[in-house]
Image (spheres, rainbow, N blue to C red):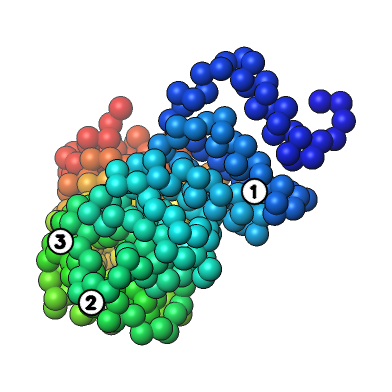
């Protein structure tokens, strides 16, 4: 187009062209919208959203996201959700919305709710949902979604399989609200450490076992556990650890979760900005997989490996080589480790460093069968030949 157009005029031209090219847009059932802030008025963007719903009247799956959320993005998202709510089976809006007197379809299965403080009377049938994601003002969202229809002794989300609750720091007392929520068939729970989530874990009616529990922290890492025991005793202990991310003792929480057989498989992913504690503070005897994205010294790695007796896979994204004089004298052993992935800057000096580390490390890993390095140094294959006669698992790396 040769000249600048207002948002409404531009959308009008686009929808007109679409109808000329294909008049069957009414058959489209899924809509993905990526919003970006633009210099427009609220009325204009609201009109654009309504125009879109006339061109695509039969949307049953709606996805809305914004690179940077502002009031205009919220207006568009609110209008789209409001217009389609009565026919949606999937509503995934990651933008804060404030619909008024909206009733979602009884066929709604997946719902992402980021509800603003002005949202009123947005009705959802709790029995229809199988996936629910709530972020932002969690207390307000739950109140408006499930309790505005009138007083209830209990709201049971009988078919909910996956629940994600991400809440900012909030000291509100929501215990009475959460005591009225029941999730009898929940299998997947994703949470972040916060006081509100702490109350949810303590007071909501949850199953004693989950297929998957995921704890997401902003600064340290992610904890993932499969087939995890979550009876009242474990919930009370977990709630104590996740009370507030700013105060949470992350390492004490990992020691509790990975220091006893609470799950069949567990994964700990540590972020790039994590500051690792000393080995003496770690009790990860039941951890299955460990992925470390922050910088780790070779001396720390050698001390860590023997402290992971049930770890089958170890991934280190940023290995640094300190002086061998700082390495422990004892040969590290681990009878469970099967997969080792090490990443470091490739250089002639680091070829020598990694070989010195492997000579120290690999003999004590009898179950290892996969080793990943950025580049295998030329010396690696002579090492395999020399050590393979004594250590059959090293001989397995011969090419």
The x, y position of residue 115, in whole percent, is 48, 63
Q: Is residue 263 visible?
A: no
Read off the residue under disc 3: 184
Residue drawn at (74%, 40%) of the image: 7
Nearer to us of marks 3 and 1 is: 1
What secondary structure is marked by label 3?
Answer: loop
Q: CA distance from mark 2 to mark 1?
A: 38 Å
Provide the residue designation for mark 1: 46
Residue at (45% x, 59% y) in the render: 101
Q: Are marks 2 and 1 in contact (CB under 8 Å)?
A: no
- Position of 378 compared to 176: left or right? right
Residue 248, x across and y down, in percent: 38, 80
Task: Decide which of tag 2 and tag 3 comes sooner along the chain.
Answer: 2
Q: In the displayed structure, would residue 153 be above or below residue 384?
A: below
Q: Secondary structure at mark 1?
A: helix
Do we see residue 179 in this rendering? yes
Residue 133 horizontal side relative to residue 386, left or right: right
Q: Which one is in front in this view, the residue at disc 2 or the one at disc 1? A: 1
The number of discs equals: 3
Taking the spot 46% from the left edge, 65% from the top edge, the residue there is 120
Q: Quadrant of the N terminus?
A: top right
Mark 1 burial class by Cα count in 10 Å: few <14, some 14-19, many 20+: many
Q: Nearer the N terminus, badge 3 or badge 1?
A: 1
Quarter holding residue 395: top left
Q: CA distance from mark 2 to mark 3?
A: 13 Å
- Precedes in sequence: disc 2 or disc 1: 1
Dots 3, 1 in contact, CB < 8 A: no
Residue carrying label 2: 179
Q: Secondary structure at mark 2?
A: loop
């Amino acid at each position: 187009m040769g000249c600048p157009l207002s948002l409404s005029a531009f959308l009008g031209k686009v929808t007109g062209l679409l109808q000329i090219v294909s008049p069957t847009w009414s058959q489209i059932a899924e809509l993905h919208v990526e919003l970006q802030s633009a210099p427009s008025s609220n009325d204009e963007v609201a009109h654009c959203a309504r125009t879109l719903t006339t061109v695509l009247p039969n949307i049953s799956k709606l996805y809305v996201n914004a690179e940077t959320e502002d009031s205009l993005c919220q207006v568009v998202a609110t209008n789209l959700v409001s217009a389609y709510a009565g026919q949606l089976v999937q509503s995934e809006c990651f933008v804060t919305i404030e619909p008024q007197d909206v009733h979602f379809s009884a066929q709604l299965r997946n719902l992402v709710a980021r509800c603003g403080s002005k949202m009123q009377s947005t009705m959802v049938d709790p029995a229809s949902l199988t996936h629910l994601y709530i972020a932002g003002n969690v207390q307000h969202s739950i109140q408006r979604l499930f309790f505005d229809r009138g007083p209830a002794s209990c709201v049971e989300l009988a078919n909910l399989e996956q629940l994600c609750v991400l809440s900012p720091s909030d000291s509100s007392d929501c215990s009475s609200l959460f005591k009225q929520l029941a999730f009898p068939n929940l299998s997947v729970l994703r949470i972040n450490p916060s006081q509100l989530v702490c109350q949810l874990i303590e007071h909501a009616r949850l199953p004693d076992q989950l297929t998957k529990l995921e704890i997401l922290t902003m600064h340290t890492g992610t904890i993932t556990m499969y087939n995890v025991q979550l009876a009242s005793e474990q919930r009370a202990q977990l709630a104590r650890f996740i009370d507030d991310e700013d105060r949470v003792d992350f390492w004490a929480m990992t020691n509790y979760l990975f220091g006893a057989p609470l799950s069949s498989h567990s994964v700990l992913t540590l972020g790039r900005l994590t500051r690792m504690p000393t080995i003496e503070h770690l009790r990860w005897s039941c951890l299955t997989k460990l992925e470390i994205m922050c910088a780790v010294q070779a001396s720390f790695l050698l001390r860590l490996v023997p402290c992971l007796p049930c770890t089958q896979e170890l991934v280190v994204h940023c290995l640094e080589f300190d002086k061998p004089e700082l390495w422990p004298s004892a040969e590290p052993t681990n009878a469970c480790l099967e997969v080792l992935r090490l990443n470091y800057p490739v250089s002639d000096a680091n070829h020598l460093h990694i070989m010195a580390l492997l000579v120290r490390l690999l003999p004590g890993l009898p179950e290892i069968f996969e080793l990943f390095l950025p580049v295998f140094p030329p010396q690696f294959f002579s090492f395999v030949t020399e050590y393979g006669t004594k250590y059959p698992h090293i001989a397995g790396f011969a090419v």
